[in-house]
Structure formats: structure tokens, C-alpha cells
Image (spheres, rainbow, N blue to C red):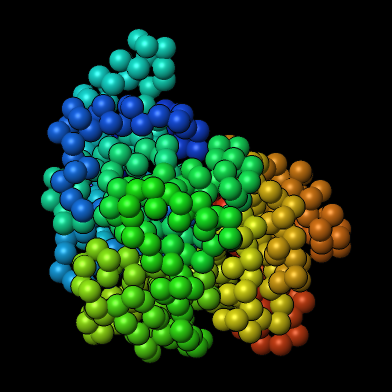
């Protein structure tokens, strides 16, 4: 049970809101220029904090945050002090910067901003004088994270790219280990309109002499990654060649997995997350931890088991309510939806599942809805509070093309959409209430708002 909110707490939260609003007023994180000059310049002025710790750097289309959380937990269980930088956040921007698994406090976030602000403003001034933009929202957060990790200090930072790789603000680090999760189409406006173009951008995190942990990829993607690794003298550990999910069984609250890495075979490991894709994320994370720790063999079984048993991944097929079950998932592209549907069908015995779906305007709404359609009896289309969210009327038209008009409902607000979905799920369900379910998905922002709505 939490204690009362003190004046100091309220003051820290208000200061956080002001600082966050100021950073948010900059160019958004999904809008970036192909240059690292501004981030490098601030880091130089700060004394190169990004070189004060070892780094596991992650890119890919889906699975980055879950894999990052698993890597961090494994390393922390081995007694290392850790930093973790992930995006986007679900409830508070402070989630993005974590020390030893815990998000920085509101007070610490404000301190970090005040520490870097003079240098950020200096670089803003230089850039504007040269006809360029101010530093972006994501560039500022990246610098703050590196400053936090150097100041802690941490032994290792687990750093997730914001978007892409080569030109991502985080790519001023020289990774000891680079992890590439499955690459698919997403963010085409900024990264390219083919998986080949996108893979080329993402291969930019592979640095001289690092170890690359490579998820199972399309042939053309794998070729690009292997070529980049060869060019930079990087060692490659490939899923399907050096690594494999050797076995898995559905269990209460998740699954039990057998994972084979270059270090050895780990059997009977409890992973409290749903879906085959999470087993593959766990495989990548374990291999990355082995590579960073340079064990040369398997890690201690009890340490691995303790770390995985404690893993969480909020907003990833998360149960936020019972009777009926309400699930929240941040899937926001066709590949993510495909993994989501497979996981729901495997882990839950719904006789009737109703979706609540809202997507961003720059996403492929038709493909997202088409991927969900086989799993959903009906769908309620809505939108998040984000300005980037697709208009509900436009989404309704797409949904009716996919589902047919009789299976589509509309609600402008998320709370109304969830209430309507619960009503529809229970009304059409003839079995137990546990057989009726609601799935909220389509965007990270919608997932975040649903978690908040449900008190998470």
C-alpha cells in the first residue's frame, strides 16, 4: 500500500510535467534527420558519457523492448549495475531511463535535464545559426540517459534504438553486443519502403569487433546483416544456426522453454510471458548476456532461471482485468499483430473475443485489421489521445471493408470503446464469463492509455 502524496512528491511531479512539456515541444521522435552531429556534440561537451560503460545495443522491428528487459534482468542477476534505455514509454517518460531495473524518479529526471540543458541549448544555438534545427525530443532523451548511466555509474547499458539504427540518436555508442530482432516493414516513411532498405539502416548499429546476435530473418535481411558484420570484423551468432528455441510448453502465466545457445542448452526455464515470439526474444537475450559476460560456456542455471522468472514486459499481452478478461498489447504493425494473434490463440481459451483497435495515421490500418480479423468476433474502433491517431471515421471505413459492417462498432473515446467491447463480448457469449474477452491493441499509445484506464 502506498503512502500519502507529500508536497515534495507533488512538486517533483509538477516539475517533471514542465520539463517533459518543454522537451516534447521539440521535433517528435518519429521525425529525425540522418545525422548524429548534434548528439555527438553534446556528448563531447559532457565528456563522452556514452563511453563510460559497456553497451548492448538493440534494433529490429518488433520485440526490442521485451528483449531489452530480459537482457537487463539477466545482467543484473549476475551482479552488474545496469542502465536501460527503451522507448516509447507507457505511463511516464521516466520509464525510458532505468537504473538497476527501476525507472529514475521524477526528481532525478528533472535533475538530469538541468545537468544537460546548458549544453543542449549551446548545440541548439550552433545548429540554428548554421540553418539547422534544434535537437529533437529523442536526441535530448538519449543524452539524458547516457548522462544518467555515467553518473550512476553503471557497468553496462542496454540501449534500444528509437527508430532504425545507423542514424538513430543512440548510435553514438560503440556496442560490445548488437542484437537484431526480426526485421519487417514499419516506419517506411523514414526507414525505406522495402525490408532491404530497412535492414540496411538497422545494420548501422554493428560496430567494429562487436558480437552480433541475429534473430531468424528473411534471407535478404540476413544477407545484409552478415555482409555488414563481415565488413566490420564482427562475430555473428545466428538463430537457426548457433541458437535455437529447442522446446517450449505453455504453462500457467506464461511458458516453459528450452534454449540452446553457443554456450550450452538451458532446459525447463520458466518465462512468465505469453507467445512463441517471447521465447525467441528470450533466446536472443540469453545469447547477448553470454556474449557480454564472455563466459565461453553456459551461464549458471540458477542465475538464468531466477532472472527469467522475474521478467516483466508491460503492455505486451498483459492481462489488466478479469471477468471478462481484458488484454492489452502494443502491437502496431502487421508482423506484431501476427505474433499477437498466435499468442492469444495459444495461451487463452476464449470462445468470444472482441477487439478495441486504434492505430496511428502513418500505419497500415488495413493490414493490421486484416491480421486481427480471424481472431475477433467483432471490433470497436476508436482512437488514442495522440494527434497522430487515425480519425475514427476513417478507421471505421477500413474496418467495415475487412470485417463487414455488422461486426464493427465505433467509439470516439477509449473508455467508451472498452465499455462497449465488454458489453458486446458478454452479450454474445453463452459460456462462462472467463470465455469472453476483450483485446485492446493497434498502437503503443492506445495500449498505454488502456493500462492507465485500468489502473496500471
Question: In the figure, is residue 383 to the left or right of 427?
Answer: left
Which of these two is toward me, 114 or 368? 368
Instruction: Please provide percent x and percent y for residue 107.
Output: 21, 44
Q: Quadrant of the N terminus?
A: bottom left
Q: How many marks?
A: 0
- Quadrant location, the C terminus: bottom left
Q: Is residue 14 left or right of residue 343?
A: left
Give whichever of 34, 403 is nearer the camera.
34
Q: Nearer the viewer, residue 179 or 268?
A: 179
Q: Pinpoint residue 409: horizontal percent, then vertical percent.
A: 77, 58
- As drawn, 283 above or below 455: below
- Within the image, what quadrant is residue 77 found in? bottom left
Q: Residue at x 19, y 43 (%)?
A: 51
Q: At 46% across and 51% down in the image, what residue appears? A: 227
- Looking at the picture, how far across and down is residue 120, in whole percent? 27, 26
Residue at horizontal 74 percent and vertical 48 percent from the top:
395
The answer to whether one can see residue 216 in this image is yes
- Residue 387 in the image, given as x and y percentages of width and height: 58, 37
Q: Is residue 162 visible?
A: no
Q: In the rendered image of this protein, does residue 196 appear above or below residue 190?
A: below
Question: For this rendering, which residue is in front, 407 or 432?
Answer: 407
Q: Residue at x 41, y 17 (%)?
A: 132
Query: Does residue 275 appear left or right of residue 59 in this picture?
Result: right
Question: From the viewer's perspective, is residue 313 above or below residue 162?
Answer: below
Quarter of the rendering containing residue 309: bottom left
Amino acid at each position: 500500500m502506498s503512502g500519502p502524496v507529500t508536497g515534495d512528491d507533488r512538486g517533483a511531479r509538477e516539475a517533471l510535467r514542465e520539463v517533459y512539456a518543454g522537451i516534447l515541444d521539440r521535433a517528435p521522435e518519429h521525425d529525425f534527420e540522418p545525422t548524429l552531429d548534434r548528439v555527438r556534440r553534446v556528448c563531447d561537451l559532457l565528456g563522452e558519457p556514452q563511453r563510460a560503460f559497456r553497451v548492448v545495443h538493440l534494433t529490429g522491428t518488433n520485440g526490442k523492448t521485451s528483449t531489452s528487459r530480459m537482457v537487463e534482468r539477466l545482467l543484473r542477476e549476475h551482479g552488474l549495475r545496469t542502465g536501460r534505455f527503451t522507448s516509447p514509454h507507457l505511463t511516464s517518460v521516466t520509464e525510458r531511463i532505468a537504473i538497476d531495473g527501476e525507472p529514475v524518479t521524477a526528481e532525478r529526471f528533472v535533475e538530469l535535464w538541468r545537468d544537460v540543458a546548458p549544453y543542449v541549448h549551446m548545440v541548439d544555438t550552433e545548429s540554428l545559426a548554421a540553418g539547422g534545427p534544434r535537437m529533437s525530443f529523442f536526441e535530448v532523451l538519449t543524452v539524458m540517459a547516457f548522462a544518467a548511466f555515467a553518473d550512476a555509474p553503471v557497468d553496462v547499458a542496454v540501449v534500444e534504438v528509437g527508430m532504425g539504427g545507423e542514424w538513430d540518436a543512440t548510435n553514438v555508442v560503440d556496442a560490445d553486443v548488437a542484437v537484431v530482432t526480426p526485421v519487417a516493414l514499419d516506419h517506411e516513411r523514414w526507414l525505406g519502403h522495402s525490408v532491404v532498405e530497412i535492414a540496411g539502416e538497422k545494420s548501422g548499429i554493428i560496430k567494429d569487433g562487436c558480437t552480433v546476435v541475429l534473430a531468424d530473418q528473411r534471407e535478404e535481411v540476413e544477407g545484409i546483416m552478415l555482409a555488414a558484420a563481415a565488413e566490420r570484423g564482427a562475430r555473428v551468432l545466428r538463430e537457426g544456426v548457433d541458437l535455437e528455441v529447442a522446446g517450449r510448453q505453455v504453462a500457467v502465466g506464461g511458458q516453459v522453454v528450452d534454449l540452446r545457445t553457443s554456450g550450452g542448452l538451458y532446459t525447463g526455464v520458466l518465462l512468465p510471458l505469453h507467445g512463441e515470439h517471447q521465447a525467441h526474444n528470450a533466446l536472443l537475450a540469453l545469447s547477448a548476456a553470454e556474449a557480454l559476460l564472455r563466459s565461453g560456456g553456459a551461464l549458471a542455471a540458477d542465475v538464468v532461471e531466477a532472472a527469467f522468472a522475474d521478467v516483466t514486459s508491460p503492455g505486451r499481452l498483459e492481462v489488466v482485468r478479469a471477468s471478462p478478461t481484458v488484454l492489452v498489447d502494443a502491437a502496431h504493425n502487421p508482423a506484431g499483430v501476427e505474433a499477437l494473434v498466435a499468442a492469444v490463440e495459444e495461451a487463452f481459451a476464449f470462445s468470444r473475443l472482441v477487439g478495441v483497435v486504434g492505430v496511428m495515421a502513418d500505419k497500415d490500418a488495413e493490414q493490421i485489421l486484416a491480421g486481427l480479423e480471424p481472431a475477433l468476433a467483432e471490433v470497436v474502433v476508436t482512437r488514442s489521445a495522440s494527434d497522430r491517431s487515425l480519425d475514427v471515421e476513417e478507421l471505421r471505413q477500413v474496418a467495415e471493408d475487412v470485417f463487414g459492417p455488422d461486426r464493427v462498432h465505433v467509439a470516439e473515446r477509449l473508455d467508451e470503446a472498452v465499455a462497449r467491447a465488454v458489453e458486446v463480448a458478454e452479450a454474445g457469449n453463452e459460456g462462462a464469463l472467463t470465455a469472453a474477452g476483450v483485446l485492446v491493441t493497434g498502437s503503443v499509445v492506445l495500449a498505454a492509455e488502456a493500462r492507465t484506464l485500468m489502473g496500471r
